[in-house]
Amino acid sequence: MENFFKKTQGRCFGTFNLKGEQLALSFKHALETGYNFFDTAQWYENEFDLGEAIKKTGIKRSDILITTKVHPDNYKEELFINSVHKSLKDLNTDYVDVLLLHWPDKSGDNSLSLDLLQQTHDKGLAKFIGVSNYNIAMLNEAISKLTVKPITNQIEFHPLIDQSKILNFAKSKNIDLSAYCSIARGKILEISTLNNIAIKHNISIAQVAQHWAYRKGVIVNSMSTKLNNINDNFNILNFELSIEEMEQISNLNSENYRIVTRERMNDKEPPMGKCVPDWD
Ligand SMILES: NC(=O)c1ccc[n+]([C@@H]2O[C@H](COP(=O)([O-])OP(=O)(O)OC[C@H]3O[C@@H](n4cnc5c(N)ncnc54)[C@H](OP(=O)(O)O)[C@@H]3O)[C@@H](O)[C@H]2O)c1
């Protein structure tokens, strides 16, 4: 979906853990830096704050793109569409650009949530629909069940995790993946291979990792509260890594470092481990 990738500039400002004034300030910085694509979720409990932050800047709704995600607890006939209306009200908009199922259904059966997702698209509540945290089999099921192509599968994607199987599958279906935790919540800053490449190009380690993901055709989500970091995270195209450097970075996936695991999801209240699929 080359056009969508281009429209988003291949970069998205995430808002997980941001609330209130901090969200407003980070949103303003991100907008001024050049981001036009913003990611939230019902789970983050900040859709209202994001709506307020957008209002405050006076930016036209049509000049930005917004993703939100439906919480798995809302995958029920009587809750799903109403929850999306509530998201839209909080975001102060009558549509989102992208609506995702945040996680697979706890029951392991995704047919109902995919059907309800399709209905939001048919009603014009979402321009594009897609999924998050789906494995290959589930993504394949989404492709066959939805009447429109899923715009993305948002998954954990950074140099320390091997997502090559699902990336190749998505590419074969002409679907762009979206990366979350693209700087592995700071873990990549400890990796000497990345540091050496960063020093050589006079850029930051975060820029190395995000340039690498962008070059793989993945839309890069990252979040920061700091102006310097927001700048770095957006400016990932004014240098070019060599093919050898790209390979060195890809080889770091043997670290097999996954942040969002079943155990971690079970630590949440209520425990959500059952949503976590068997990863490819
Ligand atoms: N679909 C899903 O299930 C899912 C799961 C997780 C996240 N997401 C989405 O993806 C977005 C990004 O993921 P994330 O926020 O979890 O992780 P992330 O972007 O990997 O890491 C964010 C953390 O890294 C720091 N950071 C950001 N830029 C930096 C830089 N250039 N140099 C050094 N440190 C930097 C930030 O701290 P400072 O504020 O100090 O810069 C923040 O604490 C989220 O905000 C959310 O929108 C989706």
Image: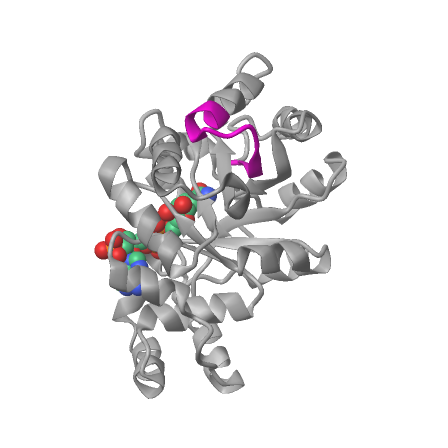
Compared to 42, does 278 lie above or below? below
Residue at the spot x=54%, y=71% of the render?
215
Compared to 87, does 242 lie above or below? below
Q: Is residue 95 magenta?
A: yes
Image coordinates of residue 50 in percent, x first then y, are 37, 36
Image coordinates of residue 43 in percent, x first then y, are 39, 31
Compared to 241, does 227 lie above or below? above
Residue at the spot x=36%, y=34% of the render?
44
**Residue, far top:** 78
Image: magenta residue range: 87-103
Q: Is residue 143 left or right of residue 76?
A: right
Residue at the spot x=49%, y=66% of the render?
213
Choose between 225 and 214: the one closer to the eye.
225
**Residue 260 seen in the figure:** no
Figure quadrant of residue 206: bottom left
Q: Is residue 214 left or right of residue 113?
A: left
Q: Is residue 39 left or right of residue 141?
A: left
Q: Is residue 15 magenta?
A: no
Q: Is residue 136 left or right of residue 183?
A: right
Image coordinates of residue 165 in percent, x first then y, are 60, 60
Choose between 20 and 260: the one closer to the eye.
20
Residue at the spot x=37%, y=70% of the render?
207
Figure quadrant of residue 230: bottom left
Instruction: Work out which quarter of the rendered image holds the N terminus and state it.
Output: bottom right
